[in-house]
Structure formats: structure tokens, C-alpha cells
Image: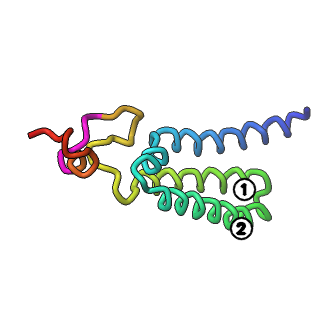
């Protein structure tokens, strides 16, 4: 493989790594939205992210080529992660910045989700 091609592959890989690292640093926000019954919101976020990716590809690929496609994909991954994290009703007790549940869910959320026999008195 020519040296110029290897350098292009490295640049494209680094651009994509930035997007995937940012998305993974936001934690499992999409999974939390699905588990909390917000499937429609999660699907809307992913659909909007896909539309953003297509629009950015049409805008960036003619001028930047493969680097433009990688940049468009990375930007759409970052936007999907931010939008999922800022989801409508992720309870404040769940910390989406990491994969760890910081503390048990708040009392109001427990009161809505647990059957009456499991609620504390």
C-alpha cells in the first residue's frame, strides 16, 4: 500500500475513533431510554442522526472525499450521543456519564414503577 494511502487511512480512522469514543463516553443512554419505555424517543433520535449523517455526507463528501464521510459520521455519532443523554425523562438518579448506576432510583420514580406491595412505608 502506498504511503499516501496509509496516511489517509490513519486520518480517517482517527476521525472515526473520536466519534465512537465520544459516544461510548456517554454511557448506555440509548439502552436506558429503551428500558424506561422511551422507545419512540430513542428511535426518533437514531432516525434524526441517520438523516444528519446523510445530509452531512452530501455536503462534505464532494469537497473532502473520504475524510468528509468520516467527519460526517463522527459528527452524527456525537449528536446522537448528546441527544440520547439529554433524553426527555432519564431519572436524575441514573448517571449516564458512565455505566454505573450511581444510586437507587428516587422515591417518586420508585413509587411510579413498583407495585404497591413493594413500596416502603
Quarter of the image for the C terminus: give it.
Answer: top left
Question: Helix, strand or loop at disc 2?
Answer: helix
Of helix, strand and loop, which mostly describes the magenta segment? loop
Q: Which residue is mark 2?
A: 59
Task: State how far apart marks 2 and 1 are (Cα).
Answer: 8 Å
* Residue, far right: 1
Q: Residue at x 50, y 50 (%)?
A: 81
Question: Helix, strand or loop at disc 1?
Answer: helix
Residue nearest the viewer, comparing 24 with 62:
24
Question: CB atoms at circles 2 and 1 under 8 Å apart?
Answer: yes
Instruction: Specify the label residue 68 is tagged with.
Output: 1
Per the rendered image, the range of residues in magenta is 102-108
Q: Position of residue 50 (x, y in %)?
A: 64, 60
Q: Residue at x 34, y 56 (%)?
A: 89
Disc 2: CA contacts within 10 A as few (<14), some (14-19) or many (>=20): some
Q: Residue at x 85, y 39 (%)?
A: 4
Amino acid at each position: 500500500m502506498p504511503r499516501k494511502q496509509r496516511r489517509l487511512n490513519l486520518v480517517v480512522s482517527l476521525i472515526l475513533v473520536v466519534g465512537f469514543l465520544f459516544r461510548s463516553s456517554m454511557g448506555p443512554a440509548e439502552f436506558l431510554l429503551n428500558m424506561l419505555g422511551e422507545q419512540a424517543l430513542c428511535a426518533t433520535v437514531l432516525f434524526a442522526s441517520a438523516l444528519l449523517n446523510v445530509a452531512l455526507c452530501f455536503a462534505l463528501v464532494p469537497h473532502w472525499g473520504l475524510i468528509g464521510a468520516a467527519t460526517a459520521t463522527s459528527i452524527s455519532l456525537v449528536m446522537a450521543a448528546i441527544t440520547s443523554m439529554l433524553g426527555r425523562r432519564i431519572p436524575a438518579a441514573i448517571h449516564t456519564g458512565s455505566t454505573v448506576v450511581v444510586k437507587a432510583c428516587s422515591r417518586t420514580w420508585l413509587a411510579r414503577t413498583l407495585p404497591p406491595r413493594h413500596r416502603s412505608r
